[in-house]
Image (cartoon, grey):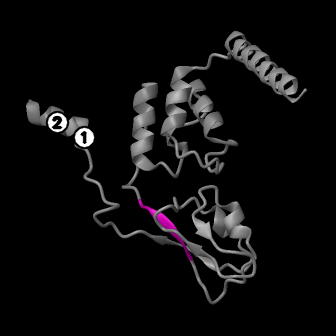
Amino acid sequence: MMIITVIFFVLLGAVLGAALGYASSVFKVESNPLVDEIEALMPGGQCGQCGVAGCRQAAEAMVRGELNPNACPLGGQSLTQTIADLLGVSVEMGEEDIQWVAKVNEADCSGCGRCYKACPFDAIVGATKQMHTVISDVCTGCKLCTQVCPQDCLTMVQVEPDTRTWFWPKPQQAATANAAA
């Protein structure tokens, strides 16, 4: 009797698996490959700082032309330029990217837990009623944690460029065109 039960459930699993596989191929929703490519470039934290709910919705709005390519503050100028190139639009580039990271003032932290719940990148670690700290290598500077901290013990500090954070800026197109002339 036990063998019949095992065989029954194995066959039932195989039939349901085949049905689900067939349904996934028949009802597959095709999406815009440009939206997929832009979404893959974005940070993926679903922080909402661009004004829409998540990175997928932001990518869709950018492709439709409803959202500017520089809407993602976490991506910085490099992401803005890459998205603008993909969309074939030009954007006004501002000053050089300034990287920010959250810093916890341990003396004021009560361990309420609101900051690490608000961080979409899991850059804040700690436990309830214990001091929290920020993993600076993971922090993107989205400032969501500072907005929910009731003790105001989180501040944003500028990251000083070092060999890990500094990058050589790419030459501008106009400069290379003038040099060739």
Q: Mark 1 falls on what kind of element?
A: loop
Which residue lies at the image location 57% right of the left edge and 27% below the top edge?
65
Which residue position is annotated with label 2?
176
| Residue 59 visible (yes or no) | yes
Query: Is any atom of residue 93 visible in this view?
Result: no
Counting labels gives 2
Q: Nearer the viewer, residue 15 or 64?
A: 15
In the rendered structure, are the residues bearing label 2 and label 1 in contact, judged by CB atoms less than 8 Å apart? yes
Q: Which residue is mark 1?
A: 172
Instruction: Report which quarter residue 119 is drawn in.
Output: bottom right
Q: Main secondary structure of the magenta part?
A: strand
In the image, 141 versus 178, the foreground residue is 141
Asked where in the image residue 53 lies, by quadrant, the reply is top right
Q: Disc number at residue 137?
A: none
State the separation of the CA atoms marked 2 and 1.
Answer: 7 Å
Residue sitting at x 61%, y 20%: 31
Range covered by the magenta-colored residues: 98-103
Up/down of 119 relative to 7, above or below? below
| Residue drawn at the location 14% of the way across and 35% of the way down | 178
Which SS class for mark 2?
helix
Amino acid marked by disc 2: Thr
On screen, 134 above or below 37? below
Please name the residue shown 78% across and 15% down the image: 15
